[in-house]
Amino acid sequence: MPPKVKIFIWRLLHNGIPVRQCIQSRFHNVQDVCPRCGGERETALHCLVLCPFANQTWQLSNLNAASTVNNNQEPWRWWSKLSELARRQLQGRKELALAAMLAWTIWKGRNAKVFEGKDVPPQQMYA
Ligand SMILES: [Zn+2]
């Protein structure tokens, strides 16, 4: 797994990825709506799992990421459930690395949208 992906997952587990909900709690004038779908508050879990754009990315794998999340869950709880699912369903570390890569891909796609105004299809982003 590339080091930047490991760091990203580490930050996710420590509530350290700068989604809008997290920025908004520090700077109250920032909108906290999801920059991709515009439908909900952008929490880490919305961004990485619940957002329709995230869902398209998970569909590139056989992992049913949406089944591992409830609203308001801590990111680390979600990640440990997803890891469990990956282990059971796909049998092995390789697949957990795949899950990490997909989460990272979603985050990259989100940033392409936020900082460059680009909508990149997940297939292209993952390549
Ligand atoms: Zn969204």
Image (cartoon, helix red, strand yellow):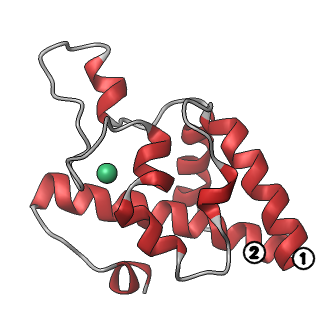
Circle 2: is it few (<14), some (14-19), or many (20+) Cα within 10 Å? some
Q: Position of residue 19 (x, y in %)?
A: 35, 37
Q: Is residue 122 above or below residue 100?
A: below
Amino acid of disc 1: Gln
Is residue 68 found left or right of 4 in the rendered image? Answer: right
Q: Please give the name of the residue rendered at 42% of the width and 87% of the height, measured from the top-left corner.
A: 127
Q: Residue at x 34, y 38 (%)?
A: 42
Q: Mark 1 CB in 8 Å range of ligand 1?
A: no
- Identify the image quadrant of residue 51: bottom left
Q: Which mark is residue 24?
A: none
- Asked whether 59 or 127 is in front, the reply is 59
Picture residue at 55% right of the left edge, 38% below the top: 11
Q: Is mark 2 within 8 Å of ligand 1?
A: no
Q: Is residue 122 left or right of residue 84?
A: left
- As displayed, is residue 45 above or below residue 99? above
| Residue that carries the numbered disc 1 in the rendered image | 91
Which sits in the foreground, 12 or 75? 75
Q: Secondary structure at mark 2?
A: helix
Name the one closer to the observer, 99 or 31.
31
Quick check: 3 left or right of 116? right
Total tally of numbered discs in the picture: 2
Q: Quadrant of the N terminus?
A: bottom right
Q: Position of residue 52 (x, y in %)?
A: 37, 62
Q: How far from the left and from the top, in percent, is residue 67?
A: 67, 57
Crowding at dot 1, Cα within 10 Å, few <14 / some 14-19 / many 20+, comes out as few
Q: CA distance from mark 2 to mark 1?
A: 7 Å
Reading the image, the residue beneath label 2 is 95
Which amino acid type corresponds to the residue marked 2 in the rendered image?
Glu
| Residue lying at 31% horizontally and 65% vertically, measured from the top left | 109
Determine whether, in the image, residue 80 is placed left or right of residue 87.
left
Dots 2 and 1: beta carbons under 8 Å?
yes
Whether residue 48 is situated above or below residue 75 in the rendered picture: below
